[in-house]
Image (spheres, grey):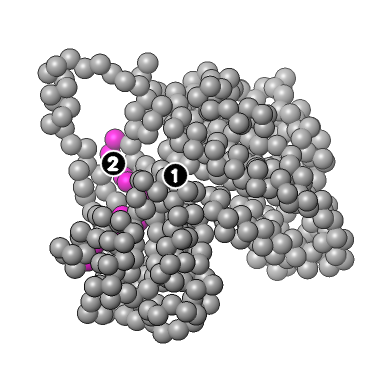
């Protein structure tokens, strides 16, 4: 069966009828949460009244057709018309509780990616077992590219701080500490979700507007089984897209001989953004930028192995991103090219090693790929900056251009120790490749 190219959100008109049930029993007090949704005409709307249960929420949808429905990870004394963090005029809201939520995304939408996400979720669940201050609540399939793990915070002291602003800042600080521990242990999670007390997360029981699959709570026992054995039991809209087995294709099509021949002669072109390893403004220095070898394993395993290289060579702060299948590593140091050639040989980074020998520098992809057929595929997700403890002992100066690159890509290196080299503007180009 051919894959349906795209879910049509207009088919959601009337989907959330009055007798539609959304189970909110996993929430302690739904009335303390903010509910927001994206409408069919692509505008955002918030519930103007407290939501007691799923029936109340469905009634709030009456004047609009929601394509994507979200709920706040925090509980508030008054969740209606919640002011933004930068709003200095409104009274500061009173935070009552905050769920700890880890978002694990492995694009693109396919069975192979979801199996990787499932394994990552189980590893994180196992790792969190000995964290006594956090009680596991549930795990939810997002409806698209991954899973959300929810935890209750059992340490209540911070929620008793009298000053509302100090209370929220303390919660954010503690969440950031936990997030740093999680990412330092090699777990690949969205670093924007966990520590943000104003964050909203997709609501279980509602449809994902791009795939038509429901965001669904999954038994933790089921999560220990291969995704391919149970994904068909997940709920979805009748017009939902089919989930492909692997990236790029939804099914195997047996072509006739002449069709096979035509396929072999057809090249698909894609656009992507690339950056040069060369440190702009220097003669022969380069940064170490590389997609970690396939042999290093899936993103989580690849990062753990990369940590060993940081230890051996003392790189210092090193930034990591993933496209769900592979891991991008950036060491923003101005390393003499001859030394970098030896390092890449020892690390068996064969492609980068060969290009540095032949061309003096390398162009490395730092974005997803764009094609007319599939739009953007495999967009990069920031993982973390690791290895900071080696900053003071690293012998090479920082590369200004690659520090700026990391910042633009969402991973600022932070406070710097030591000298910097080269110009600040990175060498970036848009490349068309087959």
**Residue at position x 17%, y 27% in the image:** 263
Compared across the picture, whether 8 is left or right of 221 comes to left
Towards the viewer: 173 or 309: 309
Q: Which segment is the magenta one?
A: 361-373
Which circle marks residue 298 in the picture?
1
184 relative to 434, above or below: below
**Residue at position x 41%, y 51% in the image:** 327
Towards the viewer: 40 or 123: 123
- Residue 188, position in %: x, y? 53, 50
Determine the CA span between mark 2 and mark 1. 25 Å
Compared across the picture, whether 54 is left or right of 15 comes to right
88 relative to 53, above or below: below
**Residue at position x 76%, y 28% in the image:** 55
- Residue 379, position in %: x, y? 41, 47
Compared across the picture, whether 84 is left or right of 355 comes to right
Residue at label 2?
A: 371
């Amino acid at each position: 069966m051919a894959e349906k190219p795209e879910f049509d959100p207009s088919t959601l008109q009337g989907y959330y009828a009055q007798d539609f049930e959304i189970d909110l029993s996993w929430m302690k007090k739904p009335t303390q949460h903010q509910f927001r949704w994206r409408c069919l005409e692509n505008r955002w709307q918030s519930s103007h009244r407290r939501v007691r249960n799923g029936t109340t929420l469905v009634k709030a949808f009456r004047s609009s057709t929601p394509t994507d429905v979200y709920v706040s990870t925090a509980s508030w004394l008054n969740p209606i018309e919640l002011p933004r963090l930068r709003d200095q005029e409104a009274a500061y809201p009173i935070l009552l509780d905050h769920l700890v939520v880890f978002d694990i995304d492995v694009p693109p939408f396919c069975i192979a990616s979801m199996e990787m996400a499932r394994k990552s979720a189980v590893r994180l669940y196992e790792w969190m077992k000995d964290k006594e201050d956090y009680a596991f609540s549930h795990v939810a399939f997002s409806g698209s590219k991954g899973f959300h793990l929810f935890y209750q915070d059992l340490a209540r002291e911070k929620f008793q701080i009298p000053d509302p602003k100090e209370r929220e800042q303390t919660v954010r600080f503690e969440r950031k500490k936990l997030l740093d521990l999680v990412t330092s242990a090699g777990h690949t999670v969205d670093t924007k979700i966990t520590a943000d007390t104003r964050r909203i997360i997709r609501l279980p029981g509602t449809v994902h507007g791009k795939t038509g699959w429901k965001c669904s709570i999954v038994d933790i026992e089921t999560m220990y089984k291969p995704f391919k054995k149970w994904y068909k039991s997940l709920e979805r809209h009748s017009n939902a897209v089919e989930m492909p087995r692997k990236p790029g294709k939804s099914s195997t099509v047996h072509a006739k001989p002449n069709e096979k021949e035509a396929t072999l002669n057809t090249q698909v072109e894609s656009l992507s953004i690339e950056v040069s390893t060369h440190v702009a403004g220097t003669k022969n220095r380069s940064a170490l930028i590389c997609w970690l070898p396939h042999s290093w394993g899936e993103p989580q395993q690849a990062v753990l192995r990369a940590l060993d290289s940081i230890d051996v060579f003392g790189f210092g702060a090193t930034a990591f991103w993933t496209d769900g299948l592979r891991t991008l590593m950036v060491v923003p140091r101005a390393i003499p090219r001859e030394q970098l050639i030896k390092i890449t040989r020892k690390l068996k980074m064969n492609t980068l090693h060969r290009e540095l020998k032949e061309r003096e520098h390398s162009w490395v992809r730092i974005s997803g790929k764009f094609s007319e057929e599939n739009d953007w595929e495999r967009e990069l997700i920031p993982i973390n900056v690791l290895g900071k403890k080696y900053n003071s002992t690293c012998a090479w100066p920082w590369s200004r251009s690659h520090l700026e690159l990391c910042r633009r890509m969402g991973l600022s290196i932070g406070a710097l120790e030591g000298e910097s080299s080269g110009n600040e503007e990175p060498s970036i180009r848009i490349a068309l490749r087959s």
